[in-house]
Amino acid sequence: MSIHRFGIALTILLGSSTGLSAAEWDVPGDFSSIQAAVLAAAAGDVITVAPGTYTGRLDFRGKDVVVQSSDGPEHTIIDGGGMTSCVLFLQGETNDAVLDGFTVTGGRGSMHESFLTGGGIHIVNSSPSIRNCVLRNNTAHFGGGIAIWEGSPSIENCVFEYNHASGDGGGLRLHYYTTAIIRDCVFFENTADVFGGGITYGHYSEGQQIDCIFDGNTAGLRGGAISSACDCNDPRLIRSSFCNSVPDHILGGWQDFGGNDFCAICDMDVTADGVVDVNDILQVIAAWGGCICVEDVDGDTVVGVDDLLAVIAAYGDCPS
Ligand SMILES: [Ca+2]
Ligand SMILES: [Ca+2]
């Protein structure tokens, strides 16, 4: 057999085997739950989910399958019921494992290294594709909306809103050798008690924010929109916008790939009451010394005379 003919034969063989194995399933037509469909499905299968609220945990179980809604996230909801993460990718799923078109809500995370992690979606050593989803009202200690540990997922055209982390990463937490692409996403009013209201980067992680909107995200200490104060590669920002972050937009380094937009923010108003006055000066003095805190207005991890002088120089109303 010539190389050319062998190539044709191989193509036919692979094509026919793929054709035989790929199947399409409907929920609730073929299976009463999404989980039952995933358990029965094989790699390459497509599971289409009808409108409704599906309560409980969905575990992809290492299956590179597509789970998509027929009518979009407004009508198709995966609800963790306040008991668990809503969706799990824990067994090496690749970019061919797809979650497309769901609202993911009511999740409170899974135990991972002694912490509740990944309120809405928990990803460990896996690299799924998350598209056209709304992560809303999920909570965890790390990663209220989504947490990723050792993976290379892509997250596209998703909305993260009203998610909360009692630690870091209200919307999204990336950790340990994670490389994520985050494209066309909105982070709206997510909160973290410590760092990174929108996103927190952790050890050895890196990522790109492409055409993303950050609005109204809040951190208890620093990094209202993004925290990258870690042993990580500085995140890349491309055509992304930042407004209404509290107390600041970004803590840590980042790479400017152009087209980014930042609303004015008054770093010197450490009491966050809209005016720089004697109370801000007193609060800076009270925090004197090393810390990662709002009183360190120049972000060098030490509250000192430079910060005090910056506050005095801004005395009066905040610049708008
Ligand atoms: Ca003030
Ligand atoms: Ca300082």
Image (cartoon, rainbow, N blue to C red):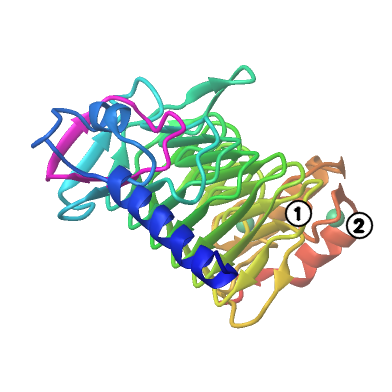
Q: Residue 151 appears in which quarter of the rendering?
A: top right
Regarding residue 189, the answer to whether it shows in the image is no
Q: Residue at x 35, y 20 (%)?
A: 83
Between 275 and 69, which is closer to the camera in this rendering? 69
- Image x and y of residue 178, in percent: 66, 46
Q: Is residue 155 left or right of residue 283?
A: left
In the rendered structure, find residue 88 and report the number of the disc placed on it. Answer: none
Q: Number of numbered discs present? A: 2
Q: Residues within 10 Å of mark 1 (few under 14, many from 20)?
A: many
Using the numbered discs, state the Cα–Cα distance from disc 1 to disc 2 in whole angstroms: 11 Å
* Quarter of the image with the C terminus in it: bottom right
The residue carrying mark 2 is 305
Q: Position of residue 50 (x, y in %)?
A: 12, 45
Q: Residue furthest bottom?
A: 259
From what the image shows, is residue 136 above or below residue 281? above
In the structure shown, which secondary structural element does the residue marked by tag 1 occupy?
helix
49 within the magenta span:
yes
Rendered residue at 63%/69% (across/down): 237
The spot of residue 287 in percent (x, y) is 80, 41
The amino acid type, in three-letter code, at marker 1 is Ile
User: Residue 167: where, in percent of width, then height?
Assistant: 59, 33
Badge 2, how many Cα within 10 Å: few under 14, some, many 20+? few
Name the outermost residue toward the top: 114
SS assignment at label 2: helix
Image-quarter location of ligand 1: bottom right
Q: Specify the segment rendered in magenta.
A: 46-67
Which of the numbered marks, if any, corresponds to residue 281? 1
Q: Is mark 2 within 8 Å of ligand 2?
A: no
